[in-house]
Image: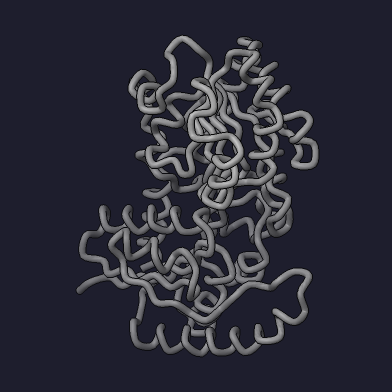
Amino acid sequence: MAIKIIISGGGTGGHIFPAISIANALKQLQPNCEILFVGAEGKMEMEKVPAAGYKIVGLPISGLQRGSIFKNLGLPFKILISVYKAFKLLSTFKPAVVVGVGGYASAPLLYAASIKKIPYLIQEQNSYAGITNKFLGKNASKICVAFDGMDKFFPSEKILKTGNPIRKQVVEIEGKRVAALQFFKLSENKKTILITGGSLGAGTLNRSVEQSLAKLIEADVQIVWQTGKSYYNGVINRLGENYHPNICIVEFLTQMDFAYAAADVIISRAGAGTIAELCLLKKPVVLVPSPNVAEDHQTKNANELVKNNAAILVEDMNAETELISRTLALLNENSICEKLSQNIALMALVDADKVIANEVLKLV
């Protein structure tokens, strides 16, 4: 008889990709298990999960809209409907275990599971627990975390430090540097900076680069600059597609492993999933945490690396004046780059997906 498991959560890639990694690991360990995803209607999980080969059910849940009372008027009704549907789903699908990967999309299902006494596991990606996970953590059977000190949010006896599941194919960069630089039409004899703000892009990072292009060209440094979908057309309209041979501008990184392989230094936001990948890459990193996330958790994630001398942090408000200057200075300090690489490697946690999947199966 197939083991039935529900994985719930989503809203962003930071929740969805770890969830899919856990599902893949479960199928490897227990090929006959039946996995159903539950997400939020209209969010990216409704597209990404089926593309990965899994069924998904959407709930009409949405998050709290900060700064807009009007947009929140319908929220209580959405919550009630979502909780009702979650109870119904648990009664029809009858999972042995429920997994919550964070985000408001996981709240109705984990709450219903707690009432129905179905064991559930929470996977908390960030160094600062979200509201949903903090509320539901007290009744969880196991809480898998990626950072130390999480006992300030959860019962210590339920915590297991596993790290965050990652997209393994993107960190497999050994021996790919030459092919990567050829892919981006860049030279093998120049240092390269990767700037990535995620699939949608980061306005602060894009402005910081655009304002410092002359400085980068003068330093004879190459960049792979991922603008993101929201900003690409504007950048290309201002600069043109072939602005300079040292500057490779892309909307989306179709081969993330090549982008990582080409880079001598990486400039990035500080989402938990991204940090998990960066630790395994063992390269010098400059983090610019997004200020537009709940509980400012990206800053807290970044500080976990900074206090271990494993990354450099530039605050979002200072990025346009400091980011490129500090990155260029770092490129010229081989000893500092080496130390950052060594220290970030010490923070890597491997096979988080398999460790978490094993914990899920223990609860069956």
On-image quarter of the N terminus: bottom left
The residue depicted at 36 percent of the width and 18 percent of the height is 178
The residue depicted at 32 percent of the width and 53 percent of the height is 25
In the picture, measured across the screen, residue 190 lies left or right of residue 29, that is right
Q: Position of residue 215 (x, y in %)?
A: 69, 20
Q: Out of 339 and 68, give the one closest to the viewer.
A: 68
Q: Position of residue 254 (x, y in %)?
A: 39, 42
Q: Out of 95 and 82, give the one closest to the viewer.
A: 82
The answer to whether residue 242 of the structure is visible from this angle is yes
As drawn, 148 above or below 57: above
The answer to whether residue 345 of the structure is visible from this angle is no
The residue depicted at 54 percent of the width and 59 percent of the height is 143
The residue depicted at 35 percent of the width and 39 percent of the height is 169
As drawn, 200 above or below 11: above
In the picture, measured across the screen, residue 350 lies left or right of residue 343, that is left
Tell how many labels: 0
Q: Position of residue 175 (x, y in %)?
A: 33, 20
In the picture, measured across the screen, residue 355 lies left or right of residue 192, that is left
As drawn, 89 above or below 320: below
Residue 130: quarter of image: bottom right
Q: Out of 233 and 212, give the one closest to the viewer.
A: 233
